[in-house]
Image (cartoon, rainbow, N blue to C red):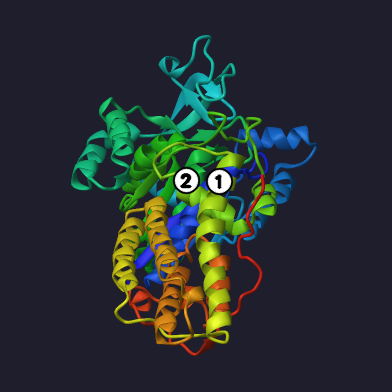
Amino acid sequence: MSRYFVTTPIYYVKDAPHVGHAYTTVNADALARWHRLVGDDVFFLTGTDEHGQKVARAAEEQGMTPLDWTDQLSPRFAEAWAGLDISNDDFIRTTEPRHAAAVQQFLGRVHENGYIYKDTYRGLYCVPCERYYAVDELLAGNLCPDHHIPLEELEEENYFFKLSAFEQPLIDWYAANPDVVRPESKRNEALSFIKGGLNDISITRTSIDWGVRVPWDDDHVFYVWYDALINYVTAIGYGTDDERFAGWWPSVHHLIGKEIIRFHCVWWPAMCMAAGIDPPGHVQVHGWLLLGGAKMSNSSVNRIAPADLAAEYGVDPLRYHLLRDVPLGSDGEFSAEGISARYNSDLANNLGNLLSRVATVVGSKCGGVGPAPDPGSRLATVAGEVLAEASAAWEAGAPHLALESTWRLIRETNAELESAEPWKGAPGPAVDAVLGSALEVLRIVAILVVPAMPSSAEAIWGRIGLDGSPAEQRLPAAAAWGGYPGGLPVEKGAPLFPRRKD
């Protein structure tokens, strides 16, 4: 059995989750669910990032301690993910004792290996970004390139990580592992940054005390990014369960937004090397979810609560839209019009209509009992092609292509029904063959859409009379043509996706 360890970034708790966070998390969930379908041993991690100056200041503005503030905000993310049917195996908070212990052990190892030293740092610092900027990175007027605000000039004694020592090791690592970062354009971006020369980086602060204490110097706390990145190894037993860590770490797949490439594709692999462990095995970089052409973020007005969208459109339609309309690796525009159009075209008119018409005709022509599929149906060939295409797309981290292929099977089945017109035929073998094949397609589709729409998959499965759950099936065997046994009660029920009139 293969292993698949998938992670989202841990989300900063300055505010409530927005649909940009949901985009990343739904994609990670869909990938996790796919790998469970193919029989992999899956571990899916998400969580919240809770230290740093930004959180401390926000808590102070609310008249609260940082811990009380984060105790209030972190559950919002867990609740949002539960509301979107996210199947994470762990939810980590950087304020947990297990994480503080892992951070101290990990960076303690880096220190022991000679890659951390003390010096004084003076520079321009962006509090929302939680990072220093070089002058040549800034906008006119010394403004932050992301937040467009003036930076603060800070000077303090810090501990530094010898990132410069890993310039050539990182170049060699990328050369030996050409697929470690995807898409290729993002790999090239990270590699170009490395080849441009790496400077040592400050990893501690004395100006704040909201963070994990440096074990060899109690006056310092670790800077938030170097604390946060270590969550990925905390959750799989780094420093506490060597066997578990060794079993899971080689199978890690980080899913991140393009704005944090340097942290995950330069700093993090270098930190791993310095600590004496392998760098991450794979990093998938995605683009931004845009609203009116602007990136959604906690620091902008472009914030939409996932719960509000789920209440308006349904959980599964929202998940489907996020997976289908914004390819991983590219920016994508998010709009109510886009969700509605995809809902009516793919869900109501195609999948929902197929389920409804088949159930209706089985009721009128077969007494409500589903017949077995035709072994020689043309749709058997289409189903085999679609399974191969969808499998390849999921394995490549391309949910949009996997779903596009799956809907090809749905469209061709609807076309087959239009051609055969079983609702006009007399009950008998010919009608049974057409309807049985359509029921077999619904069975296969129910399995293939589990990663995107788990609740809808369960509903389809139950309506065509099958026991158990589509999520319990194992591919590719479960999608072999002929799995629908016939002789099962088929329920018409209310429309699965009532057409919207926006």
Query: How would you rate the neighbour count of disc 1 (Cα within 10 Å): few for under 14, some for 14-19, many for 20 or more?
Result: some
Q: Is residue 130 left or right of residue 232?
A: right
Q: Nearer the viewer, residue 28 or 191?
A: 28
Give the distance between the C-alpha atoms of the residues marked 2 and 1, in whole angstroms.
Answer: 11 Å
- Residue that lies at the very extreme toward the right in this rendered image: 63
**Is residue 99 visible in this depiction of the protein?**
no
Look at label 1 and name its amino acid: Ala
The percent position of residue 397, horizontal first and vertical second, equals 36, 53
Q: Is residue 12 left or right of residue 261?
A: right
**Residue at (58% x, 32% y) in the render:** 206
Q: 420 above or below 23?
A: below
Side of 389 where 416 appears, left or right: right
Q: Which mark is residue 251?
A: none
Sequence-wise first label, 2 or 1: 2
Residue to which mark 1 is pinned:
341
Q: Nearer the viewer, mark 2 or mark 1?
A: 1
Q: Which disc number belongs to residue 325?
A: 2
Secondary element under disc 2, as helix, strand or loop, is helix
Q: Residue at x 49, y 30 (%)?
A: 158
Residue at (56, 60) in percent of width and height: 86
Q: Image height check: is 480 above or below 272?
A: below
Identify the image quadrant of the N terminus.
bottom left
Where in the figure is residue 104, as x and y percent of width and height?
49, 50
Of all residues, the one furthest to the bottom in this rendering is 487
Q: Which quadrant holds residue 211?
A: top right
Mark 2 belongs to which amino acid?
Answer: Asp
Badge 2 vs badge 1, beta-carbon distance below 8 Å: no
Residue at 73%, 44% in the rendered image = 69
**SS state under label 1:** helix
- Note whether residue 197 is visible: yes
Q: Quadrant of residue 357?
A: bottom right
